[in-house]
Amino acid sequence: MKKARIAVLVSGGGTNLQALIDAEKNGKIPSGTLSVVIASKPGVYALERADQAGIPALAVSRKASGSQAAFEQQLLDILESYRIDMIVLAGFLSILSKDFTDRYPQRIINIHPSLIPAFCGAGYYGLKVHEAALSYGVKVTGATVHYVNEVPDGGQILLQKAVEILPGDTPQVLQRRVMEQAEWILLPQAAEMVAAKIIGKEEHA
Ligand code: GAR
C-alpha cells in the first residue's frame, strides 16, 4: 500500500516529533511514513531524536540563507528530493510565506498550544502562549491542530482538545500538561487523518 511521505519541520526539543515517531512505530499512522526531519537551525535536540529513529535529519538556517526566498527554496529542494506529500510543523518557529504555503494546499498542518482563536497569531509561540493564558486568567486552555495557510495560526481547524488550568500553574507546568494531555495525542491523529486523505482512504477508518 502506498503511504503519504511526511516531512516534519522542527525548531526545538522535538517532543511532538517524538510523539509522531512513537505513533508511527506503534502503528498509529498507517497511512503515512516519516521521511525527513528538517530543523530551522542546527544543533537542536529534535535532530538527535530523528537520528535515533533512523529518519534523515537536516538543518536549514533562515539566517544563513540570506533571504526568506532563499530559505524557502532550500526547504522546497529538500522536500522535492524526499518526494514529500505532506508537511507537519511540530514546534517550527520560522514563518512561511504565501508562496510556500500555496504549494501545499491542505497538506501542511501545525500544532499550536492553545484553543485557537485564543492566544494565537504572530508573537504567540512556545511558553509565551501559556504565559498569556495564565495572565489573562482563563480556566481552560488546550491545543489545536490546523491546516497552514499564509495567516499565522489562521488555517482551518482539524482537531482541538481542552486542558484544565489549575491553581498555582506556572507556564512550564501548564506547557507540560498541554503537551501530555493534548499535543502528543492530537498531532499523530491529525497526521494520520491528512495522510489517509492524501492516499485516498476514508478520514476515519
Ligand atoms: C509545542 O508546545 C508546540 O505546540 C509549540 O512549540 C512547542 C514545541 O515543543 N508551537 C508553537 O507555539 C507554534 N506557534 P517541541 O519541540 O517539544 O515539540
Image (cartoon, rainbow, N blue to C red):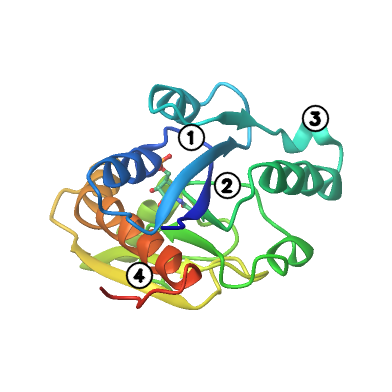
What SS does tag 3 mark? Answer: helix
Mark closer to the observer (3, 4): 3
| Residue for badge 1 | 12
Residue density around tag 3, few if under 14, some if 14–19, many if 20 or more, within 10 Å: few
Front residue of 105/1: it is 1
Q: Is the residue at mark 2 in contact range of ligand 1, meaning its CB lies under 8 Å from it?
A: yes
Number of the label disc, if any, that sits on residue 93: 2
Q: How many angstroms separate mark 1 from mark 4 (CA)?
A: 22 Å
Location of the N terminus (image quadrant) = bottom left
Disc 2 crowd, CA 10 A, few/some/many (<14, 14-19, 20+): some
- Asked if residue 108 lies left or right of residue 94, the reply is left
Query: Sequence-wise, which precedes: disc 3 or disc 4?
Result: 3
Image coordinates for residue 19, horizontal then vertical, percent: 31, 44
Q: Are marks 3 and 4 in contact (CB under 8 Å)?
A: no
**Going from the N terminus, do you reach mark 2 or mark 3 first?**
3
User: Which of pointers 3 and 1 lies earlier in the amino acid sequence?
Assistant: 1
Instruction: Count neighbours of disc 1 (C-alpha within 10 A) and say few if under 14, some if 14 to 19, many if 20 or more.
Output: many
The three-letter code of the residue at mark 2 reads: Leu
> Residue 25, image x and y in percent?
28, 40
Q: What residue appears at the point 20 percent right and 68 percent down from the top-left corner? A: 139
Check whether the beta carbons of the residues at disc 4 and disc 2 lie within 8 A of each other: no
Q: Is residue 117 visible?
A: no
Q: Pointer 3 and pointer 1: residues touching (CB < 8 Å)?
A: no
Residue at horizontal 49%, vertical 65%?
120
Confirm if mark 1 falls within 8 A of ligand 1: yes
Residues marked 2 and 1 touching at CB (< 8 Å): yes
Secondary structure beneath dot 1 equals loop
